[in-house]
Image (tube, grey):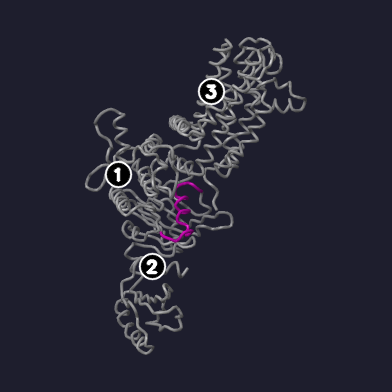
Amino acid sequence: MTKTDVLHAVRLARLDLTLVGRNTTVLFNVMLMPLLLAALYSSFPTGDVAGVEGKVFVLTGVPGLMLAFAVFINLVNAFTSRREELVLKRLRGGQPSAVAVMAGSGLGALAVFLFQALLIGIWVNRFEDVLPVNVPLMVLAAVLGVAVFGLLAAAFSGMTPNAEMAQITVLPVLLVMMVAAPVAFPADALPGPLAVVSNLLPVTPIVEMMRTGFLGADHFGDGGEKLTMAGQWTAALPSIGILLVWVVIGALLARWLFRWEPRHG
Amino acid sequence: MIFPMRTRQLADATGTGTTGPEDVIEVGGLRQKYGDFEAVRGISFTVPRGEVFALLGTNGAGKTTTMEVLEGYAPATDGTVRVLGLDPIRQHRELRPRVGIMLQEGGFLGDLTVAETVDLWKGLSRDAGRPVTMSGSTELPGGFTLLGSRIRRVDRVTMGALELVGLEKKARVRVKQLSGGQKRRLDLALAVLAAPEVLFLDEPTTGMDPEARRTTWKVVEDLRDAGTTVLLTTHYLEEAERLADRLAIMHEGRIHTHGAVEEVVATSGDMIAFRLPGTSWTFGDLPVLDGVAPALTYASGGTEVGYTLSGSDAGTRAHAALRPLLAWADTRGETLERLAVRRGTLEDVFMRVVGEA
């Protein structure tokens, strides 16, 4: 990626943020819906989970679920409608490279996601008096999460014929994330095979890395023991590995399925 | 010359591929297939620097497909394509800053304003705002000046591009609120923003009102005078006659006729045209004049009859052909309504190509 690519990506990311602010539907789905979801999840009356108060457990993991809205749904919609309106074609015919166009959308989505995660962080700090312990680990989780779901969004947009259909295309992924993501309970609390599947999904390592980074304790299972900074990174390695595998899978799927133009005929 | 041998061989087949040292666009034996459908069937042509070349044809003739291969949107199925000596696909990065593209439709974000759209594109173009020298030594309005801050200069470049296409009063309007013709003008502003060496215009004036069309023509003429090479597709024959130095008429993926505009029009020769009442007339009912059979079209309860007499002595032949025609009408007791002898037009050539093919 050249310096020009980086400049183009930043400009396109700014464009994406401008457009999110101008479209009420997108603004609601991408910005408000995840926060409402966080409020809903955290309102369930639960006791302590893995040694943490239930509300804190939910709120520190919910950013993983927010990726579905801020990145996946947002980008499937954006890629599909821009392909339909030939915006992607125009960009491809201009000076920005394909990498810059994709990176620009990813960067915009990352900014939206980080903003939401920041709001959750402030919320947890203000009302639950908990400060994040390992911010770099949380940021790494965010970057890898945006990369995985951004690439999956590119692939899914390739299977989506038009913007109306995008609402339906995203549903399976959204449902799987809502059911299997260990937001309200640890992944290991799921029954046998479902726990194995949940641990292999990209959303689980993101939720667990976020929670571990925030609370400074091992939340990659159902333990919750306090960890040193080095211990947190060591415990996160398998999750990072799973996410890197998903990045490769997402890149291959995007390369195979993503289209710059509507199909001819 | 990038591929002289190849082009010369193809030139024999199509007659359009003679290369020169200043050829900016070179197409040799281009074929383009989508599945089983062959949209372009082996065409060749070259466009020298500073020339406006028009591709004419009916819908589905292969014009836009040809254009898109040259723009680097799709690799050619077969044949050779070069723009400024570069391969549009493999040398994409080097080529993009040097070409301007006006798409046939769309490509805008409706929620951006007109000025924001130009601003965005300017931010994504290396040479955006570089002065474009126009005829009469004017510059792209709002181009480089020494006035004010960087922000002011940026604003001037954006406004300058909009003034060029007459959209300055729409600067704060969202793109989704523009008419079809205004969107075409915005597209033109984006295409010329970086002062391209080569400009691809795909049906540039579709949907424009007559005034906007003339403004667009003026922009294209000024760019041509400044040395920009223009490849243009259009359905408007008047536009091609006004703007193009040379043209090619495509039909069903092939180039059927080509050359300088005057040469192409001259091939249509002279035409004897009249109208007969009723729609029951057939070829057999009408005389053959100087070895030429009539062309018939039926409209509004009548039959339009036309004889095209080509060749350098077309005028003399038309004069001579009138006598037997009038004799035939006298014998049959028919009146030749709106009888006229006129020079052929580009439309006549176009209709002949489309009809014959």
Q: Where, by quadrant of the figure, is residue B288 drawn? A: bottom left
Looking at the rendered image, the disc whose residue lies closer to the viewer, 2 or 3, is: 3
Q: Amino acid at mark 1?
A: Leu
Where are the magenta residues, as a range?
B56-74
In the rendered view, tell whether residue A133 sits above or below residue A7: above
Residue positioned most to the left: B136
Disc 3 on helix, strand or loop? helix
Q: Do the residues at pointers 2 and 1 share their chain?
A: yes
Dot 1 lies on which element? helix
Residue B38 painted magenta: no
Residue corresponding to mark 2: B349
Q: Residues within 10 Å of mark 3 (few under 14, many from 20)?
A: many
Q: Which residue is mark 1?
A: B164
User: Dot 1, crowdedness within 10 Å: few (<14), some or many (≥20)?
Assistant: many
Left or right, residue A165 beside residue B194: right
Q: Which residue is mark 3?
A: A116
Q: Is residue B275 visible?
A: yes
Q: Residue at x 32, y 82 (%)?
A: B322
Q: Is residue A154 left or right of residue B348?
A: right
Residue A2 visible in the snapshot? no
Residue nearest the viewer, comparing A65 with B157: A65
Chain where mark 1 sits: B
Q: Residue at x 23, y 43 (%)?
A: B138
Q: Are marks 2 and 3 on the same chain?
A: no
